[in-house]
Image (cartoon, rainbow, N blue to C red):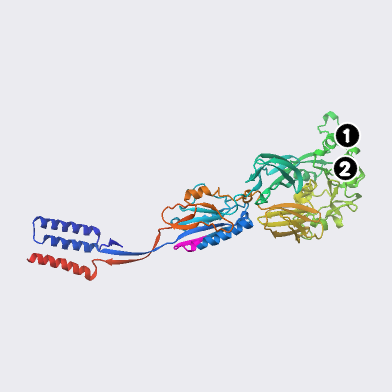
Amino acid sequence: MSVEFSPLIPIAYIAILAAICLTFALFSLWQRVRGAWMRGCALAALCIALLNPVILQMEREQLSSVVAVVVDRSQSQTAADRTAATDAALERLQTQLAQITNLETRVIEVRNNANDETPATLLFGALTSAMEDVPTSRIAGAIMITDGQIHDIPSSASELGFTAPVHGLITGNADEVDRRIELINTPRFGIVDEVQEISYQVHNDGGDASDITEVTVRLNGEIYSRELAPVGTIMPLFIDIERAGDNIVELEVEPLAAETSLANNKAVAVLEGIRENLRVLLVSGEPHSGERAWRNLLKSDTSVDLVHFTILRPPEKQDGTPIDELSLIAFPTRELFVEKINEFDLIVFDRYQRRGVLPVLYYDYISQYVEDGGALLIAAGPEHAGRDSIANTPLAPVLPANPTGTITDTGFYPRLSDAGRRHPVTRDLPGSATEPPQWGRWFRAVDVDAPEDSTVLEGPDGAPLLIFNRVGEGRVAMLMSDHGWLWARGFEGGGPHVALYRRIAHWLMKEPALEEEALRANSRGNQLTISRQTMSDSVPEATIITPTGEERTLALSEVEDGLFEAEITVDESGLFEISNGDEQTLVHVGALNAPEFAATISTPALLAPLASETGGIVQRLAANATDLPQVLPLKGTPRSSDSRMVLKMTGETVLKGINTIQLFAGFFGLALLFLILGGTWYREGR
């Protein structure tokens, strides 16, 4: 209840009137006028009536306090004993809280998101989100049921956003032990065929810190080495990057007896193997229109170092020009084809023929280079059909087809063969989906006999135009026309010469993305996608081995010619092994070395400082939560004890309504004024 004034006229006028009345009353008292005090009371009553005093009666309702019960349902809490203790504690706690009047309970269950890049236990972030609609003065506190492994604990109570106790009920046993391996330094990239250094450290949480254990290192699923590592010491590991693309390095440490979790006994690093600039040797037999197309393409590729020679003056040319007047560079045949041949990733013969420049023995060196893993591209012209063709050299055994000696000079559209529709080099060439293809014609092709391997492009009347072949460890490609430059010049709309030439070159240099038989897998969150590239019409089911050893099969569906895919949702994190026919691959699902799996033993130590600062407690739970502390609601700034969890109850109220009573309004005010005036008249009349 309170008294307020609601003036009937402006307060300034009332003040002036009150001053006049006060002056008159004081003057009357000074002159000892009979009834002066009665007149003063009458004037005061008049001024008070003008001020219109009002009695306010406010009706208020006590607001409830809000307590948050944050339940840790992360993966580290999935052990049977921890789950049982969590469920029992939550049930008993809700029973206690329900008996407290004016207390609202909010239960917040926090789980790891399978799509998180780095799964972690973020209880305080969930607490903030759940309580953002509650005024801080109404927050009674927070009770967390967890194993103590929380990854977003504020550094001080001032960062909480409220002033109320934070309590922790810890699941798990005090004598838990866990061994884990942690990657300290892992580079993201590595040069193929070079060594990269990784550093790691083995920890024993709750165990003997002076132990020495064995670490098994696997590279792309195969055992790479076994290392002896002292616990607690940062150890180096040297990995030889064996291939381009992802190289999966897996480190596994021997487990301890009765470990809480084996999930952190493995650490995985993915090193992307990248090649140093690929070295390409381009030898053009003579200047011609198509020479520039190959040269410009290879020079524009930032991953290629190009060495280009054009034979301008063959040895048999005798025109009488003195040697000292020639400005031509001698062709360093021995240096290129004997001493440094193995330094090249690809050799291209562009309209080259036997002209005495290369000794016959050098062709045998090139053939051996291909057998040992090199790559050879023959871009053939009319000379390939003649008697000086390089097909009539010791190079012949590695070539996929032999020329018949005839040349077709007629307009034709290069078309994809059945194999070409499946091969990743030619499958999705722009313009290939229509008939005729949406590109310009070529006008010359060298006829060859039946090729040994894949014909991916066909020329006139279905004759082989682009042929691929594998020889030993190496690869060979033959393009049986020198008219690809017409596409580069835009003749009849041009064609995809850049895509075609670049893919041919990179397939020869073993680009993983262009392999015709390949099994790939990638993950996004908990979605696992499997892709099978093949030259066959069908593929068997894929076999998936999960990190826990479970074996599953999955049917693949054809999404394009030669490309089969399937997608599956998995509920495990770790390294998956996938096989399909003769192909195998590995893929890691989930975050690499996520905080959620870094440490798994239960501990009160992480939450204890914050709980102590806010007036809360941290206590371990028994298996059935029978030792749950008592919940005590108090006002003010209470402190908890070992046997009780104090909640800070709010003193906040909400206004429900207001009743007003005007003191000088109506009959009461009129009667009071008449009484005072009558008293004045009576006093003066005596």
Residue 649 is a magenta residue: no
Q: Report which residue position mark 2 lands on.
A: 367
Question: Which stretch did the figure color magenta?
Answer: 96-106
What amino acid is at disc 1? Asp
| Mark 2 or 1: the one toward you | 2
Give the mark nearest the N terminus, 2 or 1. Answer: 1
Q: Secondary structure at mark 2?
A: helix
Instruction: Quadrant for residue 7, please give it.
Output: bottom left
Residue 104 placed where, x, y %? 48, 62
Q: Residue at x 49, y 63 (%)?
A: 98
- Residues 96 and 352: in front is 96
Per the image, the residue denoted by label 1 is: 319
Residue 484 — which label?
A: none
Kind of residue sitting beneath label 2: Ser
Camera-side residue: 408 or 157?
157
Where's residue 532, x and y in %? 76, 56
